[in-house]
Image (cartoon, coloured by chain):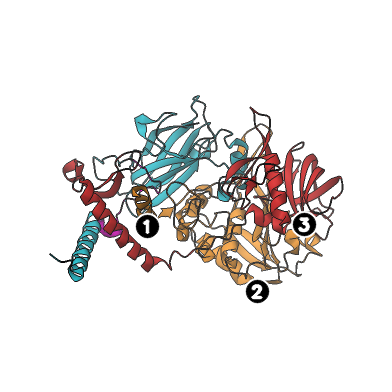
Chain colours: A orange, B red, C cyan
């Protein structure tokens, strides 16, 4: 009984304690000489070209603009997001492979309204909220171009937030990988040391954030340190 | 003055505990009160109730709903589940020169769910390396040649390739035990009661664990056929 | 004396209020509370000899090695700030100072000055978020094949058979690097 009582106390105590958390990982690859190189844009800010189609039934431009502002607001970090341009044609499953360009150094943002493009990439549009694919020089880690796909067929459903997904995928676009911070959290049954509150789970956590996915719209210190280490202002 | 409060277990069997309050006034760690077992038990009871009251007040803030998919959910959404061995993997640019895809071909060794399909199956996944250029796609499993996996497959896409039902659960790797030589599956959040092969007796619940391949396949068949 | 229910509740409520007040005072009103691990049997915290520093940011540097004294890469390290607001920072072993790759070495920069507990955790598929394939290629290709439990750093008591929940607090000073955080996994 004492054990149960103690566990009960710990349970309540843990739920009542807020925590602020950070950790990060930067995308990298192994070169032929067995070294690893980190991914990164050589000369930000980077322009983006946006699918003129709809995202979750509405214009996705405002969503991307907000995500740009989030990343451009990190202290001691270079401005990463440049100009936003509108593409000339709605990108769909019928034309995506010819409509995008992966050699112009401009991030292509696709609003995949039906999820069919996600499926063309071999993935399930039922659970894939978004995807960023980064073209890099395998010898230097220098990012050449990025394709960002946002799944408009899922983003309006409960438990997932369009804006959070956009900020997350843009983080990949800069070269950030996922963070393990959040794997042990107060909303999960996974047992581990030092769980954190869902509201403090970093945006680069690989899943939609429990309790309220909109928590992912704002960056946590983890995300901010990661991006500032990769792109220090000076 | 820096102070610390905490409840301490008094021995490893948790038979007794004591409630302490510490402060380090004067640079010393001072234990303050409640080492008497009866008093400690009484105070702890009140503390539990107090925390319970606080929790009830906060419960709306902490109301949770986890949307992660279990392996069972993935299995239910899958049209086909197969045990397969990777026989080739090739990355190449598409005809338009805009994207790199990796074509991974498998030899099917066993059909766990769905109709017996072809002897071979090919997935087309975004990403891969061609020359000095890598199209990186985080989250997409990198499958090596001769690797044995369990594939959870959804409907074919417009180009005619099956999709992975889930990125993690969609490709379960088979790990060979160095000692026994037996294959194992490590899958978190299975949601599947695990049985010993050809037995109706569950050998584990639905917790994270390393599961013998034969048992996992048997249990998966049992779970998806219900 | 017959049982008086009203008296009982008054007594109970008085004790409740007194205890709540005591906790608030002892824990600094909840804003400066020391977090406790959720696991059921953590040992008592080590006494802090001096008040924690509060200014600037520093770094934590150390190494993760196996019981066979082999450096381990791709182990996730977390530093947890002891006093509020609670802050945690992380890194992977194998990535040292200035984003250089050094076997077993880890470094956590931009650490707000203060006292910390430090722990290691393996990316081993026990939770979907810990699946190593979700991380960078370095982590994927180096994720330890051996099994070990999560454990705290416990200073001189570190060994391959120590109590995973035993910990010491380390101090990070602004502009300085706290070094020699050597983890020995219980594999």
Q: Residue C108 at what x, y percent from top left?
A: 45, 42
Label 1 near label 2: C-beta < 8 Å? no
**Near-viewer residue (A204 or B191):** B191
Rate crowding at label 1 as few (under 14), some (14 to 19) or many (20 or more) other CA atoms within 10 Å.
some
Q: Which residues are magenta?
A: C28-43
Residue sticking out furthest to the right: B118
Residue sticking out furthest to the left: C1
Label 3 near label 1: C-beta < 8 Å? no
**Residue at the spot of label 1:** A12
**Cα distance in 3D space between marks 3 and 2:** 34 Å
**Cα distance in 3D space between marks 2 and 1:** 43 Å
**Near-viewer residue (B59 or C153):** B59
Residue sticking out furthest to the bottom: A58
Q: Horizontal placement of C120 versus B131: left or right?
A: left
**Residue at the spot of label 2:** A59
Label 2 SS = strand
Q: Are marks 1 and 3 on the same chain?
A: no
The chain ID associated with circle 2 is A
**Near-viewer residue (C117 or A37):** C117
Residue plotted at (67% across, 68% down): A152
- Is residue A110 highlighted in magenta? no
């Amino acid at each position: 009984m004492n054990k149960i009582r103690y566990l009960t106390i710990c349970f309540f105590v843990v739920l009542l304690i807020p925590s602020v958390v950070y950790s990060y990982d930067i995308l990298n690859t192994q070169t032929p000489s067995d070294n690893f190189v980190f991914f990164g844009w050589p000369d930000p800010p980077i322009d983006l070209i946006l699918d003129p189609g709809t995202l979750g039934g509405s214009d996705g431009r405002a969503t991307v603009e907000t995500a740009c502002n989030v990343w451009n607001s990190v202290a001691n970090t270079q401005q990463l997001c440049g100009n936003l341009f509108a593409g000339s044609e709605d990108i769909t499953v019928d034309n995506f492979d010819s409509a995008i360009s992966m050699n112009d150094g401009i991030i292509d943002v696709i609003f995949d309204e039906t999820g069919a493009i996600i499926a063309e990439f071999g993935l399930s549009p039922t659970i894939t909220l978004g995807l960023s694919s980064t073209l890099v020089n395998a010898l230097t880690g220098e990012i050449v171009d990025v394709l960002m796909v946002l799944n408009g067929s899922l983003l309006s459903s409960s438990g997932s937030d369009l804006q959070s997904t956009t900020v997350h995928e843009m983080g990949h676009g800069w070269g950030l990988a996922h963070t393990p911070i959040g794997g042990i959290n107060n909303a999960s049954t996974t047992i581990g040391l030092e769980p954190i509150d869902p509201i403090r789970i970093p945006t680069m956590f690989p899943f939609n954030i429990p309790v309220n996915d909109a928590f992912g719209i704002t960056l946590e210190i983890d995300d901010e340190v990661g991006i500032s280490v990769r792109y220090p202002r000076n | 003055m820096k102070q610390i409060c905490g409840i301490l277990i008094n021995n490893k069997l948790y038979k007794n505990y004591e409630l302490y309050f510490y402060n380090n006034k004067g640079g010393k760690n001072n234990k303050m009160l409640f080492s008497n077992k009866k008093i400690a038990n009484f105070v702890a009871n009140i503390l539990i109730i107090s925390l319970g009251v606080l929790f009830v007040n906060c419960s709306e803030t902490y109301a949770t709903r986890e949307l992660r998919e279990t392996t069972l959910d993935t299995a239910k959404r899958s049209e086909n589940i197969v045990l397969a061995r990777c026989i080739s993997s090739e990355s190449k640019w598409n005809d338009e020169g805009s994207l790199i895809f990796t074509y991974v071909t498998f030899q099917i060794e066993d059909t766990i769910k769905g109709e017996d399909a072809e002897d071979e199956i090919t997935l087309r996944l975004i990403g891969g390396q061609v020359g000095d250029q890598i199209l990186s796609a985080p989250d997409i499993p990198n499958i090596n040649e001769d690797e044995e996996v369990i594939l959870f497959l959804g409907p074919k896409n417009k180009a005619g390739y099956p999709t992975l039902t889930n990125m993690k659960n969609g490709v379960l790797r088979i790990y060979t035990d160095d000692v026994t030589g037996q294959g194992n599956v490590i899958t978190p959040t299975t949601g599947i009661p695990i049985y010993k092969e050809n037995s109706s007796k569950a050998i584990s619940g639905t917790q994270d664990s390393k599961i013998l391949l034969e048992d996992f396949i048997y249990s998966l068949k049992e779970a998806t056929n219900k | 004396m017959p049982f008086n229910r009203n008296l009982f509740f008054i007594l109970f409520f008085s004790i409740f209020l007194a205890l709540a007040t005591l906790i608030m005072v002892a824990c600094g009103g909840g804003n400066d509370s020391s977090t406790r691990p959720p696991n059921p049997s953590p040992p008592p915290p080590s006494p802090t000899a001096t008040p924690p520093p509060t200014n600037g940011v520093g770094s934590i540097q150390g190494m993760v090695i196996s019981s066979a004294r082999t450096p381990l890469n791709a182990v996730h390290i977390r530093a947890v700030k002891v006093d509020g607001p609670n802050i945690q920072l992380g890194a992977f072993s194998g990535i040292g100072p200035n984003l250089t790759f050094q076997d077993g070495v880890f470094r956590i920069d931009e650490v707000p000055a203060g006292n910390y507990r430090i722990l290691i955790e393996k990316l081993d598929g026990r939770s979907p978020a810990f699946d190593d394939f979700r991380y960078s290629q370095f982590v994927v290709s180096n994720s330890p094949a051996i099994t070990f439990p999560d454990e705290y750093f416990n200073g001189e008591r570190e060994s391959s058979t120590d109590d995973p929940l035993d910990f010491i607090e380390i101090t990070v000073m602004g502009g300085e690097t706290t070094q020699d955080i050597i983890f020995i996994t219980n594999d």
